[in-house]
Amino acid sequence: MTPDSPPRLSLATLDRVPAESRPRTDPRGSRPRIVHLGIGAFHRAHQALYTEAAEAAHGGGWGIAGVTQRSRSVVDALRPQDGLYSFTERRPEGPATRVVGTVTEVLHATDDGARLGALLASPEVTVVTLTVTEKGYRRDTATGGLALDDPLIRDDLAGRPAPASVAGQLAAGLRARLRAGGAPVSLVSCDNMADNGAVLRRLVREFIAATAWDDRDRLLDWITGSVAFPATVVDRIVPATTDTDRRTAARALTVDDAGAVTGEPFTQWVLQDIFAADRPHWEAAGVRFVPDVSPYQLAKLRLLNGSHSLIAYLGLGHGCETVADVLATPWGEETVRAYCAEAAQSLPPTEGLDLPAYIDSLVERFANPAMHHRIQQIAMDGSQKIPERWLAPLRELRAAGRDTPLLATALAAWARRTRDHPLDDPRAEELRRAWDGPHTEAPRRLLRLLGAGDLADDTALIASVRAELDPGARPPR
């Protein structure tokens, strides 16, 4: 910090922040009752805000212990700030910034493994939430279960003191919890996976079953009766924070904030109402509790996330940098609407879910010029994202005999990126090698890598993908 720069956000400097931009609750009144694995920008711009609003409405001292899995950057940003950070809502008419005070401490999963284990065992902690991205679950592509040959999983099963995998951390935490008295707890995956609650339950149980623990059967029995795995749908576009965003926050707050995050005005959280223990009054903050979240999950995955991925890969091929850039092209809105109309045919009719209105809202959200949501960010980790976003509806629609031109275009746009550009993807090298040999066979190889051998054998689909690939990058006709 230079002599002329403002001080850094913290409890000690909070009184410098304009009153209208201070936290909605007193940060000193909260204690860690929630553990969150994966405290990146999305959690801080979504679930943490709902928790703060619920705390403001009903109290309860619901603080969040945030855990970062790999990089220490979030710890280094938030720990000196006492967990405080700002959220800027990117409104078309101008930004609105305020400080959020629900994060009580910030941990690194392995460096602070003893503290994480103690929190997971504590009866004071009754909710564990996760946003670790699809790849953080270490799933086997073919079976959907735990990838037991993954180096992180393998080393955790070998008994390293501080587990480095999410499944290992939760399994060890639940074991310690049972030994400490067995207080019930709810584990809530907030990642973009269909049936994310059931997926998380399966992975945790498979990790425990693969251990040599002498109490593993007792632990599995206890989990059946005392641990809930609610499914959930989360929705808010949260772009990567830029230096411009940090300057905007500093101007509004009059202090520097190394942990600033931003997001769009729209936000949604739908939760399955099967919690095993106490939780915040999130319904007071606008969370919708339902018996079954799957229709909302499918709509979000297949329409919002699916169209996001499509326009990201198409947009990169046309020199676009942001989602709004794509929507400003002559073909952007038309592509989003055509894709959504196609993918929506795979969705079940759901009372209270107005699909035409939902699609209209997507177009409006994507076109928001204040968002600056970089499509390079959306294009990351495609091998982990597109099986549920594209391949699941593709299977269903083709089984029903429906045409799928936009989904074929989507596959071709992604395949073209694997061929022509280095990808930020955990399977980047495998994807690149799919182009070794005759390029006409690459679409089949790529689909098989994604565990979609059935689609790889769909001659008509492969022909459609090849037809889109051969002429080069182009928007759908």
Image (cartoon, rainbow, N blue to C red):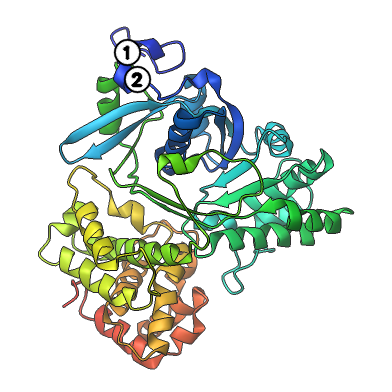
Q: Residue at x 51, y 48 (%)?
A: 131
Foreground residue, 350 or 38? 350
- Quarter of the image for the N terminus: give it: top left
- Quarter of the image for the C terminus: give it: bottom left
Q: With respect to residue 453, does 430 lie above or below?
A: above
Label 2 crowding class (10 Å Cα cut-off): few <14, some 14-19, many 20+? many
Q: Is residue 180 left or right of residue 232?
A: right
Q: What is the C-alpha distance between the residues marked 2 and 1? A: 6 Å
Q: What kind of residue is marked 1?
A: Pro
Res 417 quadrant in image: bottom left
The residue lying furthest to the top in this view is 3
Foreground residue, 330 or 444? 330
Q: Is residue 93 left or right of residue 460?
A: left
Whether residue 335 is visible: yes
Q: Residue at x 32, y 16 (%)?
A: 19
Q: With respect to residue 118, does 446 lie above or below?
A: below
Q: Which residue is mark 1?
A: 6
Whether residue 435 is visible: no
Q: Which mark is residue 256?
A: 2
CB of mark 2 within 8 Å of CB of mark 1?
Answer: yes
Res 3 quadrant in image: top left
Number of numbered labels in the structure image: 2
Res 160 quadrant in image: top right
Residue 422 at x, y percent in the picture: 37, 60
